[in-house]
Image (cartoon, coloured by chain):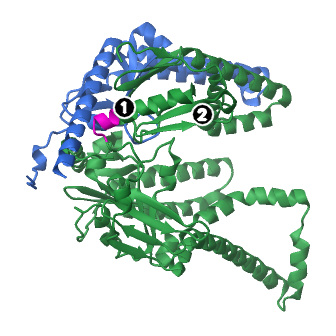
């Protein structure tokens, strides 16, 4: 039966009143290590620049290296500091992820829009027993939601939970299609 | 399928992985690496040696990466999904459910042809980033996979997979029709400002080419100026202006002719389930779009269209990386009068009621903040730096502040939104204007962003991801933004309509 009742907007579930689960304790180590790896590459490039006589590095090697060291230290500190501002939450119908200290970003992805799921475990993540969960929808060229730094076992649990939700959605959609075709 | 086995791909696929990885690296880092390479080329003395080393290292790493992908690549077919695993340092596991697969494309690249191998691409209902691609399998096996997926769709009554038209649909009567005159479609070409951008961007290349060919127009122009019955300076100015006008006219003719050829005898048929556009002079092209698959509608008016008092309506479909047809086949109605567009929306979204649309604006803090950060602060800092280092001669820089603020004001006044129970319209633009209409249940994902400054002012920006694009609304009051997101989520999560 068709209905078109008015919705009380205030009674809708409020995404802003959610308590988020923290990421794994090891997660900032992986982030800091990634930064460190990038800076090691930058140090090698700087050393290369010194050897091939790049004027800036040749004339001011100490300030350049001090600047790079300061950036490295800041990045590592920031990896640990920003960790406490990251979190995820699961509701009955969607998954939420928040990140950012100065620029906060909250993303909400409904289960019935997930196209596929990926888990990533880099060499370091495997050592730290953490993983990344990537969720894709039909929009965008990259993953729509990346939760990096979840416990490995928790990643698998969430993945299984999401897969079962997707399957339920697919079954519900198929039933709806069947009903529609019967009605026709 | 009780014991699904893990399959590997042919050794010839090493070549495929090598090419596709090289293309993807060039695409991903090419634009960023370009300036570094140029800087290296300019600063390094022994260029051939260092670039040789760079090339060798790049090719070696690419080859190692390719071999790792080949040796770790395997896939498994189960009753309801395909699982693809690859990678050593970063292990990727892709689970693609059959019900999510929209198309099974079997392509035969030239390097697979002699070995009778194919590349099987499983297109997952518009998810652009990670369609499963299985290269280097036999055609028989690819057909078997395709058949298995089709059977699954038939068993589970999933109708979206087949893009082919059934005979009954072809016989559907056209209920209404829109025809555009060839004069109008030629005018549409004049509204395409992209040709001027391309012309401006290609100017340095043209200049270099003329220089290489040794052509010198200055003598020719001097001779021409001497024939004009004007003083020398006036004659030169007249020649420059008339040359620019002539160049602009030629560009307009090119776009006008292009549009005439593309949209010749334009007809749009409104059938019960789809829209069908027939147009074209050399190739009478027919594009059909299922109404159910239209993800949103844009109404665009750039500065040229504004002069001609016309708008263009564009119906967007899902865009997919492996399905370039989806990008090409976005359906356009060019050259409608501004008050006409609302009457064509119900052709696609029957529940959209034509009414007086009143847009709500974004917060004034957008203008304050952007003016400060993007205009006032950079110009003042530059001015102080130049004033200290050189002289007060650079005082004229301050004149750019009102100009910059004016440009931001133009952008600010365009931002607006309208929302009812089922639809949202977002208005944006700079000199022109674009209205994007989306049914709420087609939204894929929503995000809320808040900077430190926005938090203090209780504002935030929202981002709505759709299957064809991403829409942004900056600087909304926090309460309003939360309300919009909650309604969007409610609509997406409570609907039983298929978004695809």
Residue designated by label 1: B98
Q: In the image, which is nearer the foreground, mark 1 or mark 2? A: 1
**Residue B116 lies in what quarter of the image?**
top right
- Tell me the blue chain: A
- The secondary structure type at the circle numbered 1 is helix
The Cα atoms of the two marked residues, 1 and 2, are separated by: 26 Å
- Residue B157: say if magenta: yes
User: Does the rendering let one see residue B200?
Assistant: yes
Q: Residue at x 65, y 26 (%)?
A: B18
| Placement of B416 over or under B499, stated as above or below | below
Tag shown at residue B24: 2
Callout 1 environment at 10 Å: few (<14), some (14 to 19), or many (20+)? many
The residue nearer to you, when weighing B308 against B411, is B308
> Viewed as shown, does residue A39 lie left or right of A47?
left
The residue nearer to you, when weighing B218 against B4, is B4
- Tell me the green chain: B
Tag shown at residue B293: none
- The secondary structure type at the circle numbered 2 is helix
> Label 1 lies in what chain?
B
User: Does the rendering let one see residue B436?
Assistant: no
User: Residue B128 appears at what percent x and percent y?
Assistant: 46, 39
Which residues fall within the magenta stretch?
B152-158
- Residue B2: say if magenta: no
Callout 2 environment at 10 Å: few (<14), some (14 to 19), or many (20+)? few
User: Residue B207 appears at what percent x and percent y?
Assistant: 80, 60
Q: Residue at x 89, y 59 (%)?
A: B213
């Amino acid at each position: 039966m068709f209905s078109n009742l008015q919705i009380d907007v205030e009674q809708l579930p409020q995404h802003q009143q959610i308590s988020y689960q923290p990421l794994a304790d090891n997660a900032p180590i992986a982030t800091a290590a990634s930064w460190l790896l990038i800076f090691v590459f930058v140090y090698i490039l700087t050393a290369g620049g010194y050897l091939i006589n790049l004027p800036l590095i040749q004339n001011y090697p100490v300030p350049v290296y001090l600047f790079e060291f300061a950036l490295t230290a800041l990045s590592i500190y920031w990896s640990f500091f920003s960790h406490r501002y990251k979190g995820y939450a699961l509701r009955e119908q969607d998954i939420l992820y928040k990140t950012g200290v100065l620029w906060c970003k909250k993303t909400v992805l409904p289960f019935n829009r997930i196209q596929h799921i990926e888990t990533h475990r880099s060499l370091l993540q495997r050592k730290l027993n953490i993983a990344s969960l990537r969720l894709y929808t039909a929009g965008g060229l990259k993953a729509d939601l990346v939760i990096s730094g979840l416990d490995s076992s928790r990643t698998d649990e969430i993945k299984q939970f999401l897969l079962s939700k997707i399957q339920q959605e697919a079954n519900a959609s198929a039933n709806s299609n069947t009903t529609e075709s019967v009605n026709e | 399928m009780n014991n699904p086995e893990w399959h590997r791909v042919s050794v010839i696929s090493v070549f495929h992985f090598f090419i596709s990885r090289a293309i993807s690296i060039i695409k991903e880092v090419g634009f960023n690496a370009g300036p570094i390479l140029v800087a290296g080329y300019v600063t390094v003395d022994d260029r051939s040696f260092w670039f040789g080393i760079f090339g060798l290292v790049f090719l070696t790493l690419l080859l190692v990466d390719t071999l790792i992908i080949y040796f770790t690549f395997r896939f498994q077919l189960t009753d309801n999904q395909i699982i693809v695993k690859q990678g050593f340092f970063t292990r990727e596991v892709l689970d693609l459910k059959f019900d999510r697969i929209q198309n099974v494309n079997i392509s035969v690249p030239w390097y697979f042809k002699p070995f009778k191998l194919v590349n099987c691409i499983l297109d997952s209902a518009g998810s652009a980033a990670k369609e499963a691609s299985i290269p280097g399998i036999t055609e028989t096996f690819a057909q078997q996979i395709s058949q298995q997926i089709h059977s699954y769709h038939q068993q589970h009554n999933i109708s979206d997979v087949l893009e082919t038209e059934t005979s009954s649909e072809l016989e559907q009567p056209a209920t209404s029709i829109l025809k555009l005159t060839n004069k109008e479609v030629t005018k549409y070409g004049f509204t395409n400002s992209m040709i001027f951008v391309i012309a401006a961007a290609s100017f340095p290349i043209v200049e270099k080419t003329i220089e290489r060919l040794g052509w010198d127009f200055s003598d020719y122009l001097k001779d021409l100026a001497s024939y004009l019955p004007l003083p020398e300076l006036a004659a030169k100015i007249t020649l420059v202006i008339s040359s620019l006008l002539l160049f602009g006219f030629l560009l307009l003719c090119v776009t006008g002719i292009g549009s005439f050829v593309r949209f010749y005898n334009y007809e749009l048929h409104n059938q019960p389930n789809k829209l069908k556009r027939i147009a074209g002079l050399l190739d009478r092209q027919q594009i059909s779009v299922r109404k159910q698959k239209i993800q949103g509608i844009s109404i665009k008016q750039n500065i040229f269209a504004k002069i001609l008092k016309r708008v263009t309506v564009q119906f967007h479909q899902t865009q997919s990386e492996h399905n370039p047809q989806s990008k090409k086949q976005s359906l356009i109605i060019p050259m409608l009068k501004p008050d006409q567009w609302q009457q064509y929306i119900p052709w696609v979204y029957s529940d959209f009621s034509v009414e007086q649309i009143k847009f709500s604006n974004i917060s004034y803090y957008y203008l304050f903040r952007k003016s400060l950060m993007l205009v006032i602060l950079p110009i003042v800092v530059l001015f102080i730096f130049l004033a200290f280092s050189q002289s007060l001669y650079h005082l004229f820089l301050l004149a750019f502040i009102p100009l910059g603020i004016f440009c931001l004001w133009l952008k600010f006044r365009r931002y607006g939104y309208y929302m009812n129970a089922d639809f949202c319209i977002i208005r944006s633009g700079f000199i022109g204007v674009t209205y994007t209409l989306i049914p709420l249940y087609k939204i894929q994902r929503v995000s809320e962003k808040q900077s430190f400054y926005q938090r203090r002012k209780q504002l935030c920006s929202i981002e709505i991801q759709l299957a064809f694009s991403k829409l942004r609304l900056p600087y909304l009051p926090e309460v309003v933004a939360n309300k919009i997101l909650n309604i969007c989520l409610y609509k997406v999560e409570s609907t039983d309509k298929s978004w695809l």
